Amino acid sequence: MKAWKKGLLILAAAALAAGVFLVRYWFVSWPLRFQGELDRFFGEGAWQCVSQETKESRMYSVIDRSYSSYTTTRPGEFREWNIAFQTSRGEEAIWTISDHTMRINHSKHFLLSRERYSARQALTLELMQLSFALAGEEVGQQVLSRVLPEEELSCLDVDISYNGGNPPPDFYDDLAGEEWFTAQKVSAACYLESDLYDFYITVRAHDYRVEKLEEDQRQHLLGSLEELCRALEEEYGDNAKYEIYLGEGLEAEKEA
């Protein structure tokens, strides 16, 4: 075979290998594969992937076929991407999205299972968790701050949660289609008013933080349960749903 033909074969093989690598990299790299979805959620040009890492999982295993004479298992792998973005308050933040939940889900459910997530559904789940945190921060800063000064407020973890167990996979398709499901627009009210699922606000005091307060601050925080309930009900009206835990015997719950 002439040298130029061999050269063409080598170039073709190299191009094929490079193409396979690029396609695989695009497929597993969510910031590339789902750039449109991330543009919609964070805002076009308002986010960037600042780092990524591959880790071993403690939650699922895969079959290791490295040895021809027998098979064994090893920890599965997953990827994390750190996304820098700007919140609706104009603050810089970094959030980690991961394909870990998807990989755990795929290890439990076969390809045609109705409980199996698509990659896009799993990404929406990751963004939902971020939106919960953003909405919870809004509740703390705009509602609970009417009752508690900053130092006492910092003892609380405020978030959004839901009743009814984990939503089915197609729930995430519906959520992704909501006009308000973006980092700039999402709020607790959006979730409380939604009929997609049964959402509510969670407020929980961390004992180790409460213990660091001065005695008068601690007593004020622990005595604020009724005022916190009232503030949430005044803000969200008939849609107000919450669970509050400030300590043993200091709990409140409201269902719409």
Image (spheres, rainbow, N blue to C red):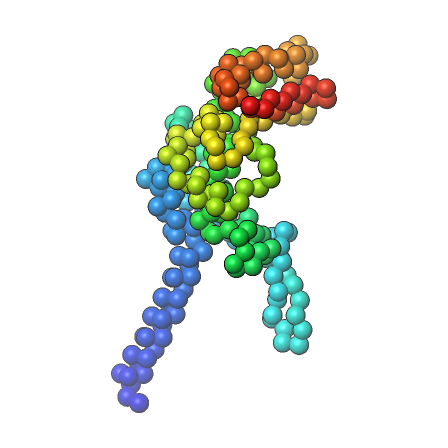
174 lies above or below 19: above
Is residue 111 visible in the rendered image? The answer is yes
Quadrant (top left/top right/bottom left/bottom right) for the N terminus: bottom left
Front residue of 180/74: it is 180
151 vs 205, nearest the viewer: 205
User: Looking at this rendering, what residue extends furthest in the bottom direction?
Assistant: 1
Instruction: Decide: is 220 above or below 7.
Output: above
Q: How many marks?
A: 0
Q: Residue at x 39, y 49 (%)?
A: 34
Q: Is residue 28 left or right of residue 115?
A: left
Residue 14 location in percent, x, y?
A: 36, 72
**Residue 189 horizontal/vertical position (percent):** 46, 25
Query: Which of the image's four quarters has the C terminus?
Result: top right
Horizontal side of residue 101 vs 27, given as left or right: right
Residue 133 or residue 152, whichever sits in front: 133
The spot of residue 40 in percent (x, y) is 36, 40
Q: 245 or 66, which lies in front?
A: 245
The image position of residue 15, as x and y in percent, is 33, 70
Q: Residue furthest right?
A: 248
Point 44% across, 39% down: residue = 175
In the figure, 175 relative to 21: above or below? above
* Residue occupying image coordinates x 54% and y 56%: 113
Is residue 151 visible in the rendered image? The answer is no
Q: Residue drawn at (63%, 51%), measured in percent from left and top?
A: 59
